[in-house]
Image (tube, grey):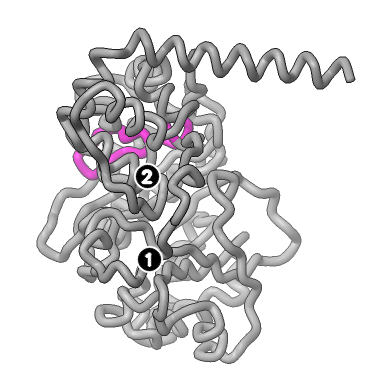
Amino acid sequence: MKITPLKSGVFSFVTTDGCTARCSHCLMNCTPNKKNKLQFEQMQKCIDQVVKEYDVKMIVFTGGESTLLGEDLVRTIRYCTLNFLKTRLVTNAFWATSLERAQRYIEKFRSVGLTEINFSVDDYHEPFVPLENIRNAWQACKGAGFESVILANSHGNNDKIVPAYIQEFLGEKIEVAVSNGPEDNEIKEPGKETLYQIYENTLQKSGRAASLDSEKFDTIENQENLACCCPWAVSDPVVSPLGHVWACCGIPSDNNAILDLGDTNKEKIKTILNRASKDVLLNAIHELGPLKLCQFVEEHSNIKFNKSFCGVCEICSALTNNKNAVKVLRDNEKSIAAIIRAKESIAKLSDVLAQKQ
């Protein structure tokens, strides 16, 4: 019973909780008033540690709005390039107020070796970042030499800005990819030409999105359909603006009793991830899934959870931010560990039988 840290080969920085926008669907609850951010030296130290200990191939910069780091972001991208690491930047393109300005930004990013760039575009960003900015940034990327240029489109029911609307606005047919789960984070071999794509994803009812109208979300009538494991936990760790290591990028996790794995200002990342990889509850999230753990809590206490979850991350947030539920799980770690081992034994037996057939 042990999770493989950084199995995906992707290591991410939530570089800042500050942003030029205050989107009503933001998972990270970012605002222009928040000022926490990582410095170049912090990110450099983390990169050195993960490259030494793990087979890391890609570094992701997200936020908040990562470009608010200015030269610290540019220096870190350059450092990754010098260490033969691919890089991905997620940005809202607030800086692309004209085609000329967008071209200057893109030229600078490419000059330090940025490999991939993702632009957030949806109904929730539009009040803060005009679609004209997205068009300027999109055009500036044409022929710039990126491996991929992605328009990340999160939308709910009845939203205006969906893939068809984006294509009409930009005046071109663009390949659309739909979220398929954790495999979307895998590093794909680059083609001979740049991949231009719209990445479509439905809203998660977490962070500020939890306050949106319920009609924005698809109702999962059979909640058992959400009873799946979470391959992200510990396999795709993230460093927060405070320097804490989170189990994944799906939920803001500073001071979360389960998902906040440790502080890089006090411990080495290897120490943090090794401890997390053997933690019973993290293994349970990874192998059994958050819904099964919610059901376990209900069976062993008077705690009751919402029966209208819309996604796995929403369930995990409700579970791990409930201190009483976490105490029930910690008090029953031996029983949970036995359930995990039983599942692993069944899986091994199934593999043996499959090989004999």
The answer to whether one can see residue 68 in this image is: no
Query: Which of the pair 207/193 is nearer the observer?
Result: 207
**Tag 2, which secondary structure?**
loop
Residue at 39% across / 75% down in the picture? 122
Residue beneath the point at 37% across and 11% down: 335
Residue highlighted by disc 2: 249
Image position, residue 207 (x, y; %): 25, 55
Q: Which one is in front, 181 or 273?
A: 181
Q: Position of residue 145 (x, y in %)?
A: 61, 66
Residue 115 % position (x, y): 55, 56
Query: Residue lying furthest right in this view?
Result: 357
Q: Quadrant of residue 328?
A: top left
- Residue corresponding to mark 1: 217
Q: Is residue 356 left or right of residue 133?
A: right
First in sequence: mark 1 or mark 2? 1
Q: Which residues are magenta?
A: 233-247
